Image (spheres, rainbow, N blue to C red):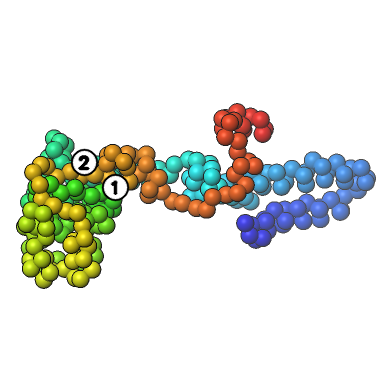
Amino acid sequence: MKNNMFDPFLAKVQKKVVGWKSKILSFGGKIVLIKHVLNSMPIHMLSGYSAENKKRKWISWKQICLPVEEGGLGIRAFHEVQESLLMKFAWKLIKGGTMWSDFFASKYVGNDHVFSVKQKNRGSRFWKGIIALMPKVLNNSKWLIREGNVNFWMENWLGDGSLKVSMSIIENEKLQVKDMFDESRPILNRIQPLVNDAILAKIVASSVQLKPGTNICVWQHTINGEFPTKLTWQLIRNRDEVCSWKKWLWKEWIPKNVFFCLES
């Protein structure tokens, strides 16, 4: 809150007081004017109305949309909720196996990997939103390798993000993990020319082994590996420091609607 925000209010007060000086008023009359006029002016101003009769916003919407522990009112920002829902659809598209994912993959992805979809401006607003969030979903999910038909460059199979994010693709971008492993160990003479020493060390130290079965895509932030929209919102939402005064203002054992009634 800045001092200049009160300039219109001070100007109005000064204008009122100048007019009263020229009037023949008793001492008691001036007290009545102060009580009923000047006292009401700051109330009117602090209620949010400026001199231009527009609602003044004392607290930003960004601050309001924080949890009460962080100084907000616990209202979820719509764009953050929408983002978490779009990430849910991106997750379904990565996992595949549903009529919905098969339809969108056939229409927009084709033979490419969803991470490298050409013409990202093509399609509906819904589809563009999914594609925009795809890197975030890929980096927070992980493939548990079984048969190994998972993209070596695009998918997060090491657990710390897609290789495409940290380095350039040197060879065929459709290379699969099974092409670089010989059952229980990596084929170093194939991998070494393609990746740097740090990535090579991670691959060698990993527990990746080819085995019978279907590869499993898991969300890294849950025990069961499933994608939870609510917890994902917690992951992507705007954050602030925890307020020490929260425990003085809000009581956990009092519902919010009852609390406001008690305060008023």
Amino acid carrying label 1: it is: Gln
Give left or right: position of 192 versus 249. Answer: left
Name the one closer to the observer, 18 or 61: 61
Crowd class of label 2 (few under 14; some 14 to 19; many from 20; radius 10 Å) = some
Marker count (numbered): 2
Amino acid type at circle 2 is Lys
Q: Residue at x 13, y 52 (%)?
A: 209
Q: Residues within 10 Å of mark 1 (few under 14, many from 20)?
A: some
**Quadrant in the picture for residue 253:** top right
Query: Which residue is located at x 41 percent, y 48 percent?
Result: 237
Residue bearing the label numbered 2 = 92
Determine which of the numbered discs, if any, sits on residue 220 in the image: 1
Quarter of the image for residue 96 reads top left
Q: Residue at x 91, y 48 (%)?
A: 24
For label 1, the SS is loop
Asked if residue 133 can be seen in this view, the reply is no
Decide: is 199 above or below 119: below
Closest to the observer, 122 or 146: 146
Relative image position of residue 44 (x, y in whole percent): 68, 44
User: Which of the labelled discs sits on residue 198, or is there none?
Assistant: none
Q: Nearer the viewer, residue 68 or 110?
A: 68
Q: Earlier in the sequence, mark 2 or mark 1?
A: 2
- Residue furthest to the front in view is 184
Q: Position of residue 212 (x, y in %)?
A: 8, 43
User: 203 or 109, which lies in front?
Assistant: 203
